[in-house]
Amino acid sequence: MATLTVPEPIPSPAEDAESIHKAVHGWGTNEKTLINILAHRNATQRKQIQLAYEELHNESLTKKLESELKGNFEKAVYRWNFEPVEREAVMACIALRKSFNSHVIIEIACVNSPNELLAVKKAYQVKCRRSLEEDVAAHTVGDLRKLLFGLVSTYRYDGEDIDVKLAKSEAKILQEHIKDNELNHDEIIRILGTRSKAQIYATFNSYREEYGTSIEEALAGDSTDEYALALRAAVACIIDPHLYFVEALDAALEKSDEDTLTRIIVLHAEKDLGEIKDKFHKRKNAPLEHAVAKKTSGDYEAFLLALLGD
Amino acid sequence: MATLTVPEPIPSPAEDAESIHKAVHGWGTNEKTLINILAHRNATQRKQIQLAYEELHNESLTKKLESELKGNFEKAVYRWNFEPVEREAVMACIALRKSFNSHVIIEIACVNSPNELLAVKKAYQVKCRRSLEEDVAAHTVGDLRKLLFGLVSTYRYDGEDIDVKLAKSEAKILQEHIKDNELNHDEIIRILGTRSKAQIYATFNSYREEYGTSIEEALAGDSTDEYALALRAAVACIIDPHLYFVEALDAALEKSDEDTLTRIIVLHAEKDLGEIKDKFHKRKNAPLEHAVAKKTSGDYEAFLLALLGD
């Protein structure tokens, strides 16, 4: 369930482009107008506005906004203006080449369906002129490389078939290595990195039934080791992506980590931010909008709240 | 250049299906008729014949042929009758689940373009109800797993762009590990498994220029270690697939390895067996057809020679 709201009827792309042109030219910038338009148009409409703007004014709207806006607001608008698949590709590229962030890669690899991940890989190649896999492998080392490469490279089987015997035997493999604190064992990475989501759920269920504890509880701990954190994030993304994003938003608000806050809201406003908001409210006893409003300010706050459907 | 020859004009699929029906029913089987039809129809035509046969006789042609034919001839006809992409998927499945053969996996991963490999992965999932990657990972261990999984999983960048500086630095990485006899080093697997073909060629060229020897010469040796053999095969498949197949055919004929002989001829007859034949003649001073005729016999020989365009 998207939180993006689009007014009815909407102006034509040329009218929107003209309103934006007025808002960013002359003395100062009218951010309110920008937010009113951009935060209330879907991906296709935003693309049409960009094309209309370029045609009418012979300049790139993206570049104009980059030069006129600043700080977290500029970053959020820049990310928002991409088409969804392109946006994930750009975020992966930034997370690998500019400011390393394994969580961006894990989310792309583990939350998307196999065909969605493939679409991101194709967009990555067009945008970044390399494969996502080679950049992941070239910018990481050791156990973290093994895990991230495994997660990102496989074109997983997307069927619902489950092999119950296999689930049981692989739950045992997981349990043995977790018990011995060998979280970096090749077999753990193989199972998480290659099995279908349906098969992994069956394995995790078997784990809970056989060993009386969930895989998440078994992996929990206060280790701040980068590999252990990545492993936990991957498991959380596979088991319950909405809950994973609730916790990630909560931690980002706590730490004033605006990059993560922006990323999750921008990536999900057009998709499933409704479910994430509901779950956040239930788990944290406060609406996500209030929590965001408390920790952000100005145009950045207004833009995020608009995307949150406020 | 395909070696498959199709007569002009060809009978309708229903006429072919009828001729085949007569050839396989009653006393004995008329193998000559089967070869005359099946070895001289392209993938689309063979598919239409199968459909016509099933419609007319309410039985599967594939199953009928399996029950009527035997030995290497039966295996070759069975493999030939698939559509090309489906055939590679079935061969991978047999090579992983029935009779392990890393060369089948290496050829599929390294000879195909990224999109051809993706098509094989999709067909594999339909046929085998798992991903190619999970079967590779589950049926191998250790260094061989790392290598095969790397090769098969990446959706490589297919562009022609080359980073000359990167080629030089990765040639150095390769040289250092090869010199120290660390052929199983993660960095060797990363470079071969993730870089684009164009980038790998540039790296291999840089290797030759800087170190005065080709990567193939550097890797050559009499080791029969499974991993070293697989690494050499992967490098050979990337550098010059036609030459790789010439050597593989030569070795298969030498060892009477009919599975390999059948695989290569059946897989390439509709594609590039012409180039492989030319190169074989030049390298081995004998036409491939003569070499095949010398080592095979009966209907199996006649079928292979028909596919070879003889």
Image: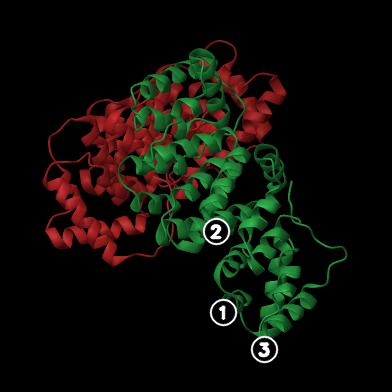
Chain colours: A red, B green
Element type where label 3 sits in the image: loop
Mark 3 is surrounded, within 10 Å at the Cα level, by few (under 14), some (14 to 19) or many (20 or more) other residues, namely few
Q: Is residue A139 left or right of residue B261?
A: left
Please tell me in which quadrant of the rendered image residue A257 appears.
top left
Report how far apart the C-alphas of labels 2 and 3 lie in the structure: 28 Å
Relative vertical location of residue B164 with respect to residue B217 in this rendering, above or below: above
Q: Residue at x 55, y 55 (%)?
A: B88
Report how far apart the C-alphas of labels 1 and 2 lie in the structure: 20 Å
Question: Are the residues flagged by discs 1 and 3 in contact, CB closer than 8 Å?
Answer: no
Chain of the residue displaying label 3: B
Chain of the residue displaying label 1: B
Type of residue at label 1?
Ser
Residue B67, numbered label? 1
The x and y percentages for residue B9 are: 88, 65
Mark 1 is surrounded, within 10 Å at the Cα level, by few (under 14), some (14 to 19) or many (20 or more) other residues, namely few
Mark 2 is surrounded, within 10 Å at the Cα level, by few (under 14), some (14 to 19) or many (20 or more) other residues, namely some
Q: Which residue is mark 2?
A: B258
- Disc with the residue nearer the chain's start (1 vs 2): 1
User: Do tags 1 and 3 sit on the same chain?
Assistant: yes
